[in-house]
Amino acid sequence: MGKKLVYFLCTGNSCRSQIADGFLKALGGDKYEVKSAGLEAHGLNPRAVAAMKEAGVDISSHTSDVIDPEILNKADYVITLCGHADEHCPAISNKNVVKWHWGFEDPAKATGTEEEIMAKFREVRDAIKDRIGLFVKEGN
């Protein structure tokens, strides 16, 4: 049996979906093919790259992509990471796709000092890592 395709979706494919993409490749790359995209492409957030680097995962070569209907309809799992993407996700014609919503706060909306903003990125990163770990372990 081949790898299952997991497609992480967010609004801008800049933070949360990129973090999830990086962790699933790192923790479950042997079992899953991983892609991520957004309703729009906002570019890779440098703070997300920095937070992931601290966790030992390099996502600096990732690109920020818009949702590809072909990937969407051949994915085994489509996982939205923000409410906006969940509500505005394009229709999935393939009825075998498992669609889940894992809501995480948007660290890009954090305000305050650089240290406070990075603390929010780390908090969201760690929450996503925990959720990915559970998914890899239990398949859900």
Image (cartoon, helix red, strand yellow):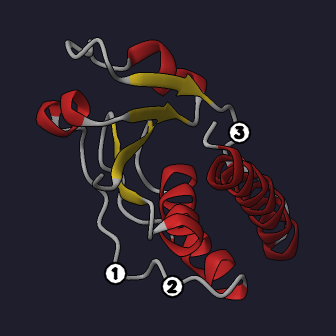
Q: Quadrant of residue 14?
A: bottom left
In space, the residues marked 1 and 2 are separated at their CA atoms by 8 Å
Q: Is residue 44 left or right of residue 20?
A: left
Query: Could you say where residue 120 lies in the image, as x and y percent from the top left?
Result: 81, 59
Of residue 5 and residue 15, the one placed in the foreground of this image is 5
Query: Is disc 2 placed on a helix, strand or loop?
Result: loop
Location of mark 2 (residue): 58
Q: Choose the circle earlier in sequence order: 3 or 2.
A: 2
The amino acid beneath tag 3 is: Phe
Is residue 57 rendered to the left or right of residue 118? left
Q: Which residue is mark 3?
A: 104
Which residue is found at the position 64% from the left and 36% from the top? Answer: 140
Q: Is residue 91 left or right of residue 55?
A: left
Q: Is residue 54 above or below residue 43?
A: below
Q: CA distance from mark 3 to mark 2?
A: 21 Å
| Residue 73 at least partly seen | yes
Residue 41's spot in the image, x, y percent?
Answer: 30, 49
Q: Which residue is mark 1?
A: 61
Name the residue: 25% across, 52% down: 65
**Residue 12, relative to residue 118: is it above or below?**
above
Q: Residue 103 placed where, x, y %?
A: 68, 31
The total of numbered circles placed on residues is 3
Q: Is residue 36 visible?
A: no
Which three-letter amino acid code belongs to the residue tagged 2? Asp
Residue found farthest to the front: 1
Callout 1 amino acid: Ser
Dots 1 and 2: beta carbons under 8 Å?
Answer: yes
Q: Of callouts 1 and 3, which one flags the residue occurring earlier in the amino acid sequence?
A: 1
Q: CA distance from mark 1 to mark 3?
A: 23 Å
Q: Is residue 36 left or right of residue 54?
A: left
Q: Residues within 10 Å of mark 2 (few under 14, many from 20)?
A: some
Q: Nearer the viewer, residue 123 or 131?
A: 131
